[in-house]
Image (cartoon, rainbow, N blue to C red):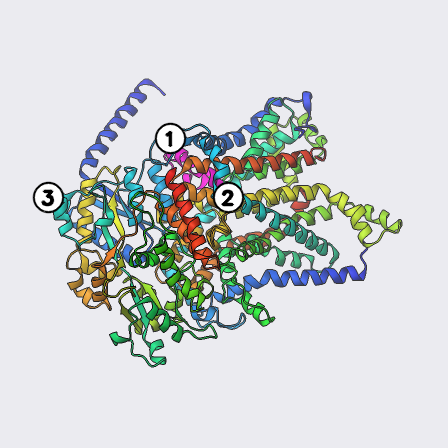
Amino acid sequence: MKIGKRGFGERHIPIWGALFALPALLYIVLFQLYPILFSFYISLHDYDLLSDPVYVGFKHFAALPYDRAFINSLWITIAYVVYTVVPVLGLSFLLAWALTQVRKSRGLWRTLLFIPSVMPIVSVALVWKLIFNFNGPLNDAVTLAGGQAVPWLNNSTYAPIAIVIMSWWHAVSYYMIIFLAGFLSIPRDYYEAAALDGARGFQVLRYITLPAMKPTIALAVVLATVNGLKTFAFQQIVTDGGPANATQIMTLLIYKTSFSYLDMGRASAYSVVLFGGILAISLLQIWFLRDRNG
Amino acid sequence: MGFTKKRTAVAALSAATMLASVCASFAVELTFWHHTYPPAREFIEKKAAEFTAKNPDITIKLHDDPHGDYEVKLLAAIAAGNPPDIVNVLDYLFPQYASRGILAEVDNAAFGVNSKEELEALYQPQALSGLTIDGKVYGVPEEFNTLALFINKEHLKEIGLDAEDEANWPKTWNDLFDLAAKLTKEDGSRIGFNWVWNLDPYWYAQQYWPVLQQYGCEVVDSEGKAAINSDACVKAFSETWKVLIDKNIGGPNMATVNPVNALQDFSEGRQSMAIAGIWAPPLFSDEVKEQYVVAPLPQLDPENPKTLLNSYALAVTAASENKKEAFEFLNFLTSDSDGYLAATGYVTGRKGWADTEAAKNTRGSDIFAEGQKHGSFVWRSATWTQEGNAIKAAIEQFAQGVPVKDALDQAAQEIDSVRQR
Amino acid sequence: MASSSFQRFAAFAILGLAVLLTLYPVAWMLSASFKTSQEIFTTPLLSVGAAGLSNYTSAFAERPFFLYLLNSVLASAVSVVLTVLLSALGAYSFAKFRYRLAPVFWIVVLISVMIPLEAIVIPLFLQVHAFGWTNTYAGLILPTAFNVVGIFIFRQTMISIPDAYIEAARIDGAGELRILFSIIMPMILPTIVVVSVLTFNLTWNSYLWPLIVTSDDTLRTLPLGMAAFQAGFNTQYGQVMAVSVFGALPTAIFFLSLQRYFVEGAIATGVK
């Protein structure tokens, strides 16, 4: 990433620049970097929160491949991210496109669609927990349509699907706004030129819109992935990782391993792996976006 | 800052420090963390005011958070070396906490006794056993509970049975399931009986522990190896938990998933029978409050009954600087069995609780008192939570059709691997 | 964009369906907040609940929700101010200056965005405890107040501001701080709105940190109050929904009053 590519370079006093970054950096070092470094340190120890840490080297990392809870959570996390990121981005892209097509009361549509993003997560989780109840409204609709009531939250196959569905509902409008901004910032003359060339419908999408939106899409993919990997509240509130650990996403496993099992060393090793995953994906973002700043 | 100013500041500071330390030797503020339960909060605050009236130098500051979150926050405070003086801890956590030196041994003198034996003599037999680790007592019950069967009188009446008549109470698990099948309505509007589902591992354990005891199933054998996949355990789960699902009487699908009230279906009158404690009736809707009957817990062998004991206990932390005062307050608080039961529905486990005025006014208190005599606490382990989680996962698996034996094999494997760490 | 009538029809159909699916759970929550527990699963969405306002009044009678609300507003407001301030300064540095340490600084910023709170909560708590901040407003608010994503968003916008503006100001003898706060910031108001709304929401939803760091009822934020209320005595689901509605209102109002600028801001930030 090119920092200060468009800066003033040598002509101006760079010391100001460094000074301006300092308050933010100081904050980050104090409240984020130091704790994560502490986590790295703890991952090399046996630590139960209550007695002093005992150094054990890479024991916790060496144990990971044989740790069923960890492997289980790893797959669940990956599946969750895949099944949320792709549909959420697809749907939000579609909605953003649809918003560009309406002239009248676009603001109203947008406002209504954005409501899920401003609802408190706890409220969202509780409402959906009721909706997914076996005797809840969703199954009423399913049976009305002639189907069999689905045990949404009590079945290892359906519970992850239920969590994914509520995640879609909650996340789509957020990315919709990002895509909408992307759409609206495509210069109008691109389209006019394309129309003159006789491009229509999907051709416009394929040759004008998508290429122009590529950086927005890349950003949204990375944001959605990082947010997906950091998800916690839905799985904790709605299913608490169950049934039979089918929704035990990595953050929840870390939380339980720290606070219920008092195994901070192991939990920190999980954190390091999760952190590594997020880091790798973010580095991909930098790589994708490296030539498109400004 | 000039020299004089600095000196004045130092003098003022040391005077303040001295003053503070002098005050500290007189005034004591005990911090007390409790899980959220408004009636308990009101009662403890009332007793705290009485205690302060008697001991003007001691005040008590109470704080509560929801069960679950409460434990998380407590651990963080302990890790920072700054726990409250008095804590509220579930019995199954005692081995975990005691093995790490978090809790202080009970101060006999504060309870007006001279020995552990005399302390135990203040309580129902076994009441302190779940709070005793390696021969040392680390807490006293705030609640000392057992479970019984709650029956909805109106529902039984609809199928022509009088629930007040002991002869109609299901004595065995088979009786229970037969009766449940008769009570269940096919349209799903009524469930005869159900276990609790979708809750934390300890909730599950409270329900299966008596069953396992009755079938002679051990979670962990005497050598410390997992035995939850033994024939006895497979039989226990197959003939109780699994059978309910197979016969389509109950099961997780039929239960209303409610994070607020584990007994919602019974509370709202959709379920005819439920296993619960003496603390349950305040959760019931007004209708159900009028029409429940308490019967003993069903058994495999009614001649040789086995039930559960459990305790949300009160303890003093080892880091507390005012242990003596803290234990004195605990004695003052928990010796009021009558007041406790009347205000909160909690049974203190002290001898004579069943003869109090409040107990006489509590439906089923005789059943609970009898049940306490045949109970035992869930297995003790410093890694209880992991082990309980493994069994919870097994139950949730066989509820979905995985063979009981396979599910329990997995749980056993998990328990062994946790214990080997 | 010249769109065919088919396209416009498709767009309306999509939006209509999406709005229905979006609003259904919200409507359900609203409706449930006026129902008794028995009614919640047995009566249709549009039926009027028998509970009336009782779910709301009983919730408010049991817990000081207005106090919790004030705490949440305070925490969110401080977070917004701190985030806008630190992000603007940091972003100005990254967007308009070139210096040797900048890439190192940037990596530090990047890393901090990726850290899930669950992974660092214990070390953070130990740290805050060492400051003597447990159970204080400082401890409640400051350690999680700064939403680092703000730096990214501000930087994107500031990059697109032509350098000529800044240079002209410098020639006029304006100091760097003045350039930032009286020239650049007024130009990017919509971006400030975007950062504010995102940060407000983030802090509003905070649960784990406030739980661990506070032990006074007077310091509880709204999500903590909601959880404590639910765990309370014989709580009805309708009451939980009532509290949820109450908890959703402030963010909804905050966003709706700013939403015009919000989208403008999202466009201006050039998340493109």
| Disc 3 secondary structure class | loop
Question: Residue C36: horizontal and vertical position, in percent?
Answer: 43, 69
Question: Residue A44: horizontal and vertical position, in percent?
Answer: 44, 30
| Disc 2 secondary structure class | helix
Q: Residue at 34% across / 59% down in the picture? A: B207
Q: Which label was assigned to residue C159?
A: none
Residue B242 is left or right of residue B142, and the answer is right
Mark 1 falls within which chain?
Answer: A
- The segment highlighted magenta reads C117-143
Residue at the limit of the structure toward the bottom, as seen here: B160
In the image, what residue type sits under mark 2? Met
Q: Residue at 22% across / 49% down in the picture? A: B129
Question: Residue A146: horizontal and vertical position, in percent?
Answer: 60, 71
Distance from the alpha carbon under mark 3 to that under mark 1: 38 Å
| Disc 1 secondary structure class | loop
Which residue position holds label 1?
A: A53
- Dot 2 or dot 1: first in sequence order is 1
Which residue position holds label 2?
A: A250
Q: Which label was assigned to residue B114?
A: 3
Mark 1: few, some, or many residues within 10 Å (few <14, many ≥20)?
some
Q: Is residue B365 visible?
A: yes
Quadrant of the rendered image containing residue A261: top left
Q: Are marks 2 and 1 on the same chain?
A: yes
Mark 2 falls within which chain?
Answer: A
Which quarter of the rendering shows the N terminus of chain B?
top left
Residue at the limit of the structure toward the front, as seen here: B231
Count how many numbered circles sit on residues in the image. 3
Mark 3 falls within which chain?
Answer: B
Q: Residue at 28% across / 24% down in the picture? A: B10
In the image, what residue type sits under mark 3? Asn
Q: Nearer the viewer, residue C16 or A19?
A: C16
